[in-house]
Amino acid sequence: MSIVTRTLADQAFEVIRERILSARIPPLSPIRQDALAEELGISKIPLREALARLEQHGLLQSHPNRGFVVPALTTTEAEEVFALRLKIEPEAAAHASLEADEAERATATAALTALENATGGDGRAMVLLNRAFHLALVRPGGRHVTSQLIERLHVLAERYVHKHLEPAGRHARAHREHRALLKAWMARDPQRVTTLLADHITVTLDDLRKQLRGTATATAPAKARRSVQE
């Protein structure tokens, strides 16, 4: 039995990550390091380590003389991340469906069960479990570089997945799509896996386009007022 020790930086990383994903720290907000370190009861050294990791995950951006800022959710970034997923993930999952052994098939099934059981829970858990399910579909077969690339894309997509699941009914639809995808994957039907996963990613991106367009429209007047006042 191994004991996993969570450092102060690990704990700070998880707390701040959850706040960003849940929009408690909204897009374009600066990170006030002094206040945050005091609130969390830690020094700036582990806090900076956590912030640097969050930047690597695409959840923060650092700017000279400004520190760390939560990046905006943009259609441009969503288009890029989900387009890359479309190029890599469906074929990878199709290949993995043919290569998966019984243990890996059980892992994929358990991942979907955990995701479905978390519906209605905290958003952070949903996003992490969604990623775990998708990665369980691409890892079998020994394509380690491909799996790592897909995992990186899922990390970059996390805020967008959280945003996508906000409207009512999205969880139920996602579960239907996931169940159909897992059924095809378990049947070792690569063509259907490719089609279903490509459709799943495409529909998510289409939804995000509409959501992000609406967000941009809603915030435009406020930005204009600030420009006038300044």
Image (cartoon, rainbow, N blue to C red):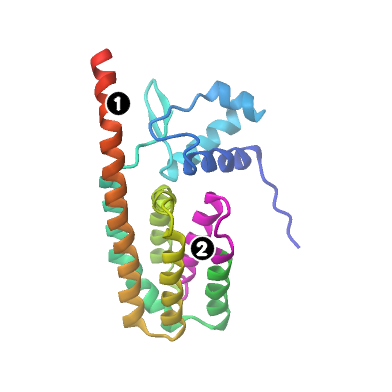
In the rendered view, tell whether residue 17 sits above or below residue 94. Answer: above
| Residue 184 screen position, x and y as percent | 41, 81
Name the secondary structure under disc 1.
helix
Vertical relation: 105 (above or below) 66: below
Please state, as top left, top right, bottom left or bottom right, where the N terminus lies in the image.
Answer: bottom right
Q: Main secondary structure of the magenta part?
A: helix
Q: Which residue is mark 1?
A: 222
Locate the C terminus by quadrant.
Answer: top left
The x and y percentages for residue 165 are 43, 54
Asked if one can make out residue 43 in the rendered structure from this viewpoint, the answer is no
Task: Tell me where residue 215 appears, x and y as whole percent.
Answer: 31, 40
Asked if residue 147 shows in the view, the reply is yes
Q: Residue at x 40, y 48 (%)?
A: 163
Which of marks 1 and 2 precedes in the sequence? Answer: 2
Relative vertical location of residue 165 with respect to residue 51 in this rendering, above or below: below
Name the element at disc 2: helix
* Residue found 42% across the figure and 83% down from its top: 98
Tell me the residue at 56%/83% (across/down). Answer: 102
What is the spatial separation of the Cα atoms under label 2 and label 1, in whole angstroms? 38 Å
Q: Quadrant of residue 222?
A: top left
Counting from the top left corner in percent of width and height, residue 116 is at 54, 66
Over which residues does the magenta segment extend?
115-140
Judge left or right: residue 230 versus residue 183.
left
| Mark linked to residue 132 | 2
The quarter of the displayed image where residue 120 is located:
bottom right
Q: Nearer the viewer, residue 14 or 92?
A: 14
